[in-house]
Amino acid sequence: MKYYSTLLFLVFFVTFSAFSQEKVIKYTVANGETINQIAVKFKVTPYDIYALNPDARRGISANTVLLIPTSNAKPAAVKSETAVAKTVSNTKEIIHEVQPKETFYSIEKKYGISDAALKAANPTLEKTGVQTGQKLVIPAKGAAPKSLAATEKPAKEKAQEKYVYHDVVAKETKFSIAKQYGITIEELEKRNPEIVSNLPVGYRLTIKGKAPKTDASVAAVTNTVKPAETSKKATSYMEYQVKPKETFYSLGRTFHISQEELTALNPSLSEGVKEGMVLKVPAGYLAPSPIIAQQQPVEKTVERQLENTGGGIQIVDKVKSETVSANPEVVELTKKRGENERKKLVLLLPFNLAKMQNDTMSSVNRIKNDKFLNMTLDFYSGAMMAIDSARTLKLPIDVAIYDSQETKTTSNVSTLISQNKLQDANAVIGPFYQNNAEATANTLRLYNVPVISPLSKDKANPIDNLYQTIPGNDVVRNAIFDYMRAKNGNIVAVVDKKKESVISYIKQNQKGVVFAALTETGGLDVANLKSLLLPNRMNYVVMETGNTAMVKTTIKALIDSQKTCQVQLVILEPNSTLDTDEISFDNLVKLKLMYPSVTRESDEAGVLVFEKEYRLKNKVNPNTYATRGFDVTFDTMMRLVQGKTYQETADLMTTEQVDNKFQFYKKEDGGHANKGVYILYYDTDLTLKVAN
């Protein structure tokens, strides 16, 4: 396989999709031209060109065809047909077609109109909200988009632009220089494309505008810079797509950058962090494509090891790792003194390599389209970190990894059992699919081998040696109600009548919870809600609705009620409505929004060490499946060296790893499930904290 070309193609695919909304032009490279020269010619940065042409990072030659973004590629006087149509008249109403991810706020900001004016011109908006493809009437006042006004400056004014020069001194950054001159980092890079990848000491920058008041002192300092001085660390950038639940805090921790610096790099962040946003961030901590970049080396390793062992995967990699030295745990799991009996752990992972070798689909398309394979490789990479950590601790454990060759209804487990490869294991992790995990547990039950289901959320059949590691939905919901009752809280539910399953769950399982009344039109009866709040107890208001109007009404009522009583807002599951511009994040923080989760966010030392070591090994940040691969595998290995069986430790010990808690209990009908759930809330410092 040509992994390098595969990776470049996939990075291009992911990157290009982020720019699919932006028009581009094709440009043929002339003999001797460089990326920097082309960037200057079209008034873009090399970063912009590389984003659309990742292969160009390896070099360009004459007649190479590049894609150039047109947002800055044409002189300001040249406008697209759309722009011309929008500026035909500043005195008439115009029609705007809503684009994907546009909101009330972004449209109003674009045209410089108020929320009231937009809704007055489009009366149905209150009920329908903004929908992609919808045609909106933009009222006459301020109808021209602000961005167009900026491009219509007279040529005379442009001719009078002034420039000053700045010599970079030691310890200066792009952010500090941009702030000093009142410009953005993007403007600084467009004027000086050579500094996109680094900022060398002594480099003379061209700055548009007036020099700062401290110009004289700066000049004096730059004259004293020694030629031998070099920049402490070159800065380069890449693209990163925001994942669910990420915040300024978590992004800052990942990329070692402040909120102010991150916003300077990405002005769109002034409206808040939103899932799916594509951000410009410092490179070096993550690869250009977090998922795809990780898969290439992992897939290669798996194939090599399978060829060497004829079906089993021999662990041959060695990485010095501190990962396990500070793992956060509810119960301290350490190697028992004198415990030298070697244990055997088996991992059954669905690589489906035989299918891949016989399939006509190219490896490029498979990695791009096969989400199940991506998930498997992520889990595998985390498990390998756990195995490396166990080796560093010199744990007496032999690990065998087999390709389970899974589909939803079939697997290779029966063949492995017929070859006597699983019966003598002290624990088996996998398979991934629920049906296959249950079939494996049923067969190995005769040999008293525990089977740990690592990823399935399905409700399991009663099999004594089957351990479900992901808490079920009802367990997650029960956990937060148990927490609220333990705090002697007054629990009130605000539930949309469309949420029939939630209403049924609360009525059947959570006795004593009072429902706030709804109006005849289905809205919240605010007076009734306030009457249910008690002044001498913490009032937990469980809100379950996707209706924006009901969410806003509930939040406003609770903010008002905080003047007379204690109130905390609670949700039972992720609510995408809370992530829109319509909902104030500040209000959610004031109400200390709380919810249950099977994973946590932590900045404890052990967690940070794991993330650091994972990045060093895989060149990307660990995602949810990679972290789970580590947590399940390492937790299982540590349980095996306690001088007890896995089954005994499961009955006795609650443990905690990087993201996951393992608190097993025996179900009434047989088998074991995990009730390790975190109760998370937003604290006043805008960070997520664990309440329990």
Image (cartoon, rainbow, N blue to C red):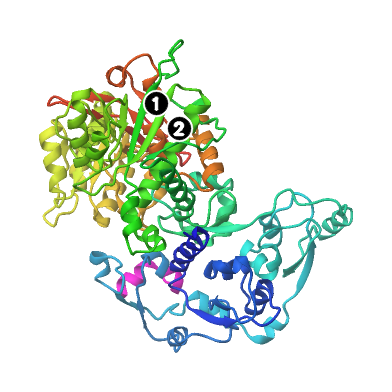
Q: Does the residue at mark 2 contact the one at mark 1 (Cβ under 8 Å)? A: yes
Identify residue for label 2: 387
Identify residue for label 1: 637
Q: Which quadrant does the C terminus fall into? A: top left
Question: Residue 493 placed where, x, y %?
Answer: 20, 40
Q: Nearer the viewer, residue 611 or 58?
A: 58
* Residue found 43% across the figure and 87% down from its top: 85
N-terminal of the pair, mark 2 or mark 1, is 2
Classed neighbour count for the residue bearing mark 1: other residues with Cα under 10 Å, few (<14), some (14–19), many (≥20): many
- 457 versus 55 height, above or below: above
Q: Is residue 533 visible?
A: no
Q: Nearer the viewer, residue 447 or 46?
A: 447
Element carrying mark 1: helix
Q: Is residue 17 left or right of residue 497?
A: right
Segment tinted magenta in the rendering: 108-121
Q: State the CA–CA distance, disc 2 to disc 1.
A: 9 Å
Residue 120 part of the magenta segment: yes
Residue 595 part of the magenta segment: no
Question: Residue 629 placed where, x, y %?
Answer: 39, 38
Q: Is residue 38 visible?
A: yes
Q: Amino acid at mark 2?
A: Ile
Q: Amino acid at mark 1?
A: Met
- 553 versus 610 height, above or below: below
Classed neighbour count for the residue bearing mark 2: other residues with Cα under 10 Å, few (<14), some (14–19), many (≥20): many
Question: Residue 494 placed where, x, y %?
Answer: 20, 44
- 307 versus 343 height, above or below: below
The residue most toward the top is 338
